[in-house]
Image (cartoon, rainbow, N blue to C red):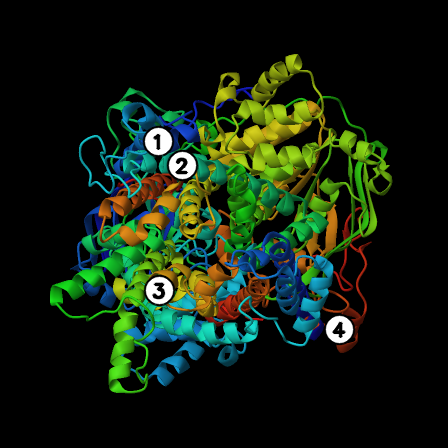
Amino acid sequence: MAGFLLRRLLYLVCLVVIATSASYFLAATQLNPRARYEGRNPPPPSAVVDATLDQLNMNDKVPVLTRYQRWAGDLLRGNLGRTIDNQPVNDEIGRRMWVSLRLVLIGALVGTFLGVAAGAYGAVTQYQLSDRLLTVFSFVTLSIPAVVLGVLFKNAGIGINNLLGFRLLYTTGEMTPGLDPWTVTGLLNRTAHLVLPSLVLIVIAVAFYGRYQRNAMLDVLGSDFLRTARAKGLSRTRALIKHGLRTALIPMATFFAYEFALLFVGATFTERLFGWHGMGEYFVNSVTKNDVNSVAGVTLFVGVLVLIAGFLSDLAYAALDPRVRV
Amino acid sequence: MPQEPLLSVSNLSVSFRSESGLVRAVRGVSYDVRPGELLGIVGESGSGKSVSSLAIMNLLPGHAQVSGSARLNGQELIGRSDEELSAIRGKQIAMVFQDPLSALTPVYTVGEQIAEAVLVHEQVSKAAAKDRAVQLLELVGIPNATQRASAFPHEFSGGMRQRVMIAMAIANAPALIIADEPTTALDVTIQAQILDVLQTARKVTGAAIVLITHDLGVIAGVADRVAVMYAGTIVETGTVDELFYTPRMPYTLGLLGSIPRADAGARQPLTPIEGTPPSMVALPSGCPFRPRCPMRQDVCAEREPELLPIEGDGGPDARSVRLQPDPPGGPEGPQLQAGATNDQRPTTNDHRASCHFRDDIERRGLTSRDIFVAPAPTELARVLGARETRPTMLAVRDLVKAYPLMKGAVLRRKVGEVRAVDGVSFDIREGETLGLVGESGCGKTTTIMEILNLEKPLSGSIQVLGKDTASMTRADRFAIRRDLQVVFQDPMASLDPRLPIGDILAEPLRAHGVPDAQVSRRIRELLQLVGLQPEHVNRYPQAFSGGQRQRVGIARALALEPKVLVLDEPVSALDVSVRAGVINLLERLRAQLGLSYLFVAHDLAVVRHIADRIAVMYLGRIIETGTVDEVFDAPAHPYTQALLSAIPLPDPRKERQRVRIVLKGDLPSPANPPSGCRFRTRCQTFGALTEAQRQTCINEPPALAPRTGSADHLDACHWATVETVL
Amino acid sequence: MANTASTVPGAAGPEEASSRLQLVWRRFLRQRLALFGLAIVVLLFAVAYLSPYISLWQYTQLDFNAFLEPPGGSHWFGTTQNGFDVFALTMRGMQKSLVIGLLGALMATALAATIGAFAGYFGGVVNTALLTVIDLLMVLPAFLIIAILSPSFRGHTWLIFVVLLAAFQWMVTARIVRGMTLSLREREFVQAARFMGVPGWRIIFRHILPNMASLLIIDATINVSSLILAEVGLSFFGFGVQPPDVSLGTLIGDYAGAALTFPWEFYFPAGLLVVLVLAINLVGDGLRDAFDPNTQGRA
């Protein structure tokens, strides 16, 4: 058993190493950090640029293998290198992952719960009005790109503010700069910032989970064990909730696991639209800024989280389904 | 009538809307169930037997339209709300379903699920309900009930799960238990156990039982009265003796004549019922059995016969049959108590049949052989010499096949190995049929897969037509596949649903490079050979009935003119009334084409009918082998005896007199078989042996040896004694 | 009847001989919503490709007399601040989105089917190797990889972009196909073919993949809409279709900021995109219902 787990772990570590290295090589050969300096006016002397790039380990005049060696050596000591703005990548990730979590957590929790509830309810009342409404809602929402949904909510928020004549909802940032976050005013201000992006995330999550939970529940509806539960004397509703919903949660385990493991990765579009400086924004910026070390760092971070998610998903399965317990 | 009926169903109809139109699944079914009696409902798939009972419980899907009446103790059930019915379900009427794997919720322990049945209807504490659950588990014969109550359904075997279902059904001492094919998914020895448990449950609760099944044998042994269903309606009803000995509806007659019997000595061709049950969407006018009935007249097309009493029934002969006292302690014991106050035998108008000619059949005393005609035996292609002089077509020596034993679904890993086949030897001579029998898990399927793979076995050897698979090249294997073909169990699964049958039959021909010009001619030949119309080449498999599909499967196997055919349960997925036709076809083909069969089956009656020789497997080994008559008439191994004893015979009188050997427990895990004799843990004679004899069983694996006097009859029991059980 | 050479009379019932595909098609036609979706997709396709002939403006053309004009006159969807015609831009964008979606979906599903089936059927080393590739691609953040590579297909054909999108879209389906192959491989009709001596690759293409047709068709339909949405996401950040070419994604990205002030610039492309994706999803859903024998056929 121990040997088996160890082999499995080794395999996963290899996967992350290969993935991270691959994205390092891609970034190091495809991105052009030099452009960031050469574009300045007046352009700095090339010796200065070379020195800066050397310090950052991003000089394209150095062979890529040499750069990789230095980067990998640092990585073994737990150092992800420096960003193109000469900040430690570790710090950047360490700071931004919490920003992402603060943005996404509430939306994910509320959205998942509501979605599962709505999906189960929809399946139980199949073909009735409530079910049809949910189906249409899920269907339409899942056809709208997150970007467009975000823009719609943002503009709706601005509309509400204009209507009220004062600023109830904020559309940019995590909180108004200079406020103490741990006072009542600070918390209210944070909440006012969080409402719109959270709504976007909730709507998407409800649509997603509503649809999948409904399908999972419908799969269970015709099953023999529900018939047995009713033959015992449970009413339809009670049998559906106690035996049906409980069993229909099993196939959702994977979704739950991935969602919660990837909370730190944030929401790229929502962050961008609402001006939150989380991991999602970092994703995009690392490429636009030709920031090789950040790209590699982000890949590593996401890769590890994906593997954790896979592990969590196995755990969730085992927790929900006695058949797979070892 | 001495007693008010417990359940009175009248004119019950159920229909569903479907793609192809309104499916009239149940059409005006009426029957009574008296307190404490066991009513058997027999019918083939689609006859409406399960749907009608689910309709009573209101457990059908929402789009089913139910009409008619079902009264439980005078109280109407049809049309009641779900809330009202939930108070009745599980409390007054309980159900046992067919497939015990899917019928239990996978995520709760069996203890919780039984306790739940108690808690819904009674105001007791959770702890008390749990205790009740344990008691019930003990009652239905689950060892270590206290611990097993906290196990999950997937940790139980099929038979054990069915015991759990029965425990759940009797939790609230219901007045009626509806058992819907409770033993269909189970092996025959486990079926005997479960029927035993059902009888115990009946004794303990005094409940009446409605037993729904397709197996006439099961009904013959346990039922008081029987109703036969065909095309959504009851076509004949009466006491079990009336139905089995004086059936008056041609369908019942045909059914009884078409089933092979394990206790039948001389081999006679079966009398098949032609055709297939009608589609419930487009029923023929008049009598639904008309298209298949050899007695049909014009009147049959004009109106559907009603279910009416048989005139002149109850003559001296019949009465003497019915007044015969039951053997003491026989299966009808509880029924005697229930109806002890009066003449418990039903009055004459209880035997009813829906046939315009029922009185005619009665007067003339027609049997199935008078109405249905059995095919004449086919002339052999050429006369075969004595067995020893014929060439060996297939020889298996000490075959071993092991699988890695995996554990865990999340973290799959190998934890050991299972020897699914552990030293199996047999051979098949030209023109001969060997029946390889055994219950699920005995290794018979693994054995034939090893043969068909034509690879070098882990240990031992396989020789096909004298060539050893170990030394074959790729080209040799490809060439020998012409001579070794297979027919599978499930005619639905063995034909690719996306290809018309012409293409299906062409596949083996094309694979072996038969020129296109010959392919289409050969396909027509093949279709004719198996009794299908050559014009049907462009139809898809789904346009054919199960029996016809199996004929296509047989035609495909014959395409390359093989010499040996492996038949993997070729009739077990078919409806009872079409089985006989396929069995007769296989017998005809063997004679006509001089084939040799390896016939794998769990149904011993079929094997007795079709095979020359038989090999009985248990836990990866052959434990008895010999000619069919030797093994069936004088079984020497205790397992063979138990297996034969567990077969229900479609003969109520014989059933009442038989003493059944009911084996203990389940098949041990093949991953960890018992030492010495593998059967000793369940052996019925082990207990009667001396200590020294038992030590031999524990320490020494018995070898196959002739112990009965016949050199050809081998068994693997140290203390074999012949015992007749059929 | 008694004759041994007798023929079993007629096959079952009236519904004989209608092939499965016809049945599926009949059921599909019964679903009004799905048909409506199909009609919309066809309509949008036609309009997108016919627009150069019906519109007065081409997407490369500037109207120096109309900057930021609201819809009206010859500019049906209004104009941008440079004087581009929003209708022409949107139609051009839709052409690109449609082609990317359809082509990418075809590639992704074909890849998934082939790889999944081979891994499942042959098992062993083939299986291990392919599963490792799938695991690896799942760990790699697709968004990031395509973003890094986006400058390199600037000025080249957008086909590279489609290939990249498809390359990250097939893994989940391949796993499902593999799982289904594992169970189909044990099915008796596949075994029968094997015992007849039919080679493995032929069994895959003749028996295994056709028996997953429903899954593959549905998957391809879903892929169309997910790829269109993926293109929008990437193009929003400038990592997708590169100028001077336009797609619905680049338009949405470019004009998201103008949604409040000059709504026509944003809402026309965004609205049409939503309609397009919705219509494709309706078709996918209708196909799923038509293939699923368990649905009751009440649309």
Image mark for residue C98: 2
Q: Name the element at disc 1.
A: helix
Q: Are marks 4 and 3 on the same chain?
A: no
Q: Position of residue B321 (x, y in %)?
A: 40, 48
Q: Residues within 10 Å of mark 2 (few under 14, many from 20)?
A: many
Image mark for residue A245: 3
The answer to whether marks 2 and 1 mark residues whose Cβ atoms lie closer than 8 Å is yes
A319 versus B61 height, above or below: below
Amino acid type at mark 1: Phe
Q: Position of residue B50 (x, y in %)?
A: 35, 49
Q: Are marks 3 and 2 on the same chain?
A: no
Q: Name the element at disc 3.
A: helix
Which quadrant is home to the C terminus of chain C? Answer: top left
What residue sits 80% from the left and 55% below the top?
A: B704
**Dot 1 corresponds to which residue?**
C45
Mark nearest the camera among 4 and 3 is: 3
The answer to whether residue A112 shows anywhere in this view is yes
User: In this image, A85 relative to A204: left or right?
Assistant: right
